[in-house]
Image (tube, rainbow, N blue to C red):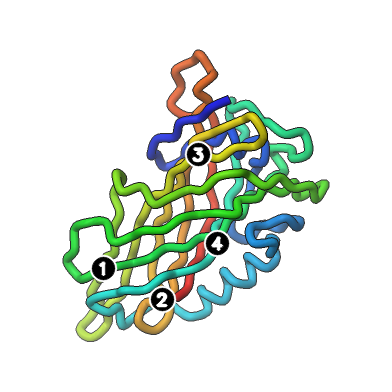
Amino acid sequence: MTIDIRPAPIVALGLVMALGGCLGSGSGGGGGAGGGSGSADYETAYDEVTSRIATSDMPTSIDATYEGQFKVGVNSGSAEAFGSSVTPSNAEIIGDLSLAVDWTDGQTSNPFTGSATNIVATDVVSGDSIQLQGTLNVDSGQPASVSRLPVIPGVDTGSMMVSLTGDVANGDDEGRVYLGLTGQFYGPGGNAMQGVVTGGINDMDDPDAQIFDAAIGGSFYATQ
């Protein structure tokens, strides 16, 4: 099975369907997360970023690398699920994020480079996991930005958006995954970011011409 993903509020994930299920920020889960951390560790790190409070002193430039994770669930849709050890409706997927930001206020070009790796799907009922082969990279062909947003004199917040795409595989099954990350900056000087993930998968072996076969949604965090 091969999958092609195109940007949309919620997309399809044929490949991750074999791993994929229904999850998001705040959902529980078993082990087998990206980096070997697991869902509980993800939630702890996510909450730590939130506790930093939204940035109020957004700088006029950033040159830094942010490291973190994303965690998503997969709607079953019509995409073929592969892999028998993870039930799509029970699955959560966690992967490691590394996003380098080279940005100056007013910049219109994509300020991001980086990737998502170590992508693991876990069945939260059985605890079984599947690690996907492959890497998702920042897609330079999709809109991406960092924005400095004045609120009142002396108080500036910040927002961001970026897309990652790439091919992943589970054995002989291959897919092209799209992730859209949208969020805001947290902490002094925007030293962290956190927000929502949307995306999906399209099963190219399916003769029907649907736009997406399944959808994914969840959250992410990253810190300097």
Instruction: Decide which of 143, 102 is in the foreground and name it.
Output: 102
Crowd around label 1: few <14 · some 14–19 · many ≥20 (10 Å): many
Q: Residue at x 30, y 74 (%)?
A: 62
Q: Residue at x 54, y 57 (%)?
A: 70
Q: Residue at x 49, y 36 (%)?
A: 176
User: Of circles 3 and 4, which is in front?
Assistant: 3
Measuring from the top left, give residue 214's x and y in whole percent: 55, 33
Answer with mark 3 or mark 1, whichever residue precedes in sequence: 1
Amino acid of disc 3? Asp
Instruction: Decide which of 169, 126 is in the foreground and name it.
Output: 169
Crowd around label 2: few <14 · some 14–19 · many ≥20 (10 Å): many
Crowd around label 3: few <14 · some 14–19 · many ≥20 (10 Å): many
Measuring from the top left, give residue 177's x and y in whole percent: 49, 40
- Asked whether the viewer can see residue 75, the reply is no
Residue labelled with disc 3: 167
> Mark 3 to mark 4: distance in Å?
18 Å
Helix, strand or loop for disc 2:
loop
Residue labelled with disc 4: 69
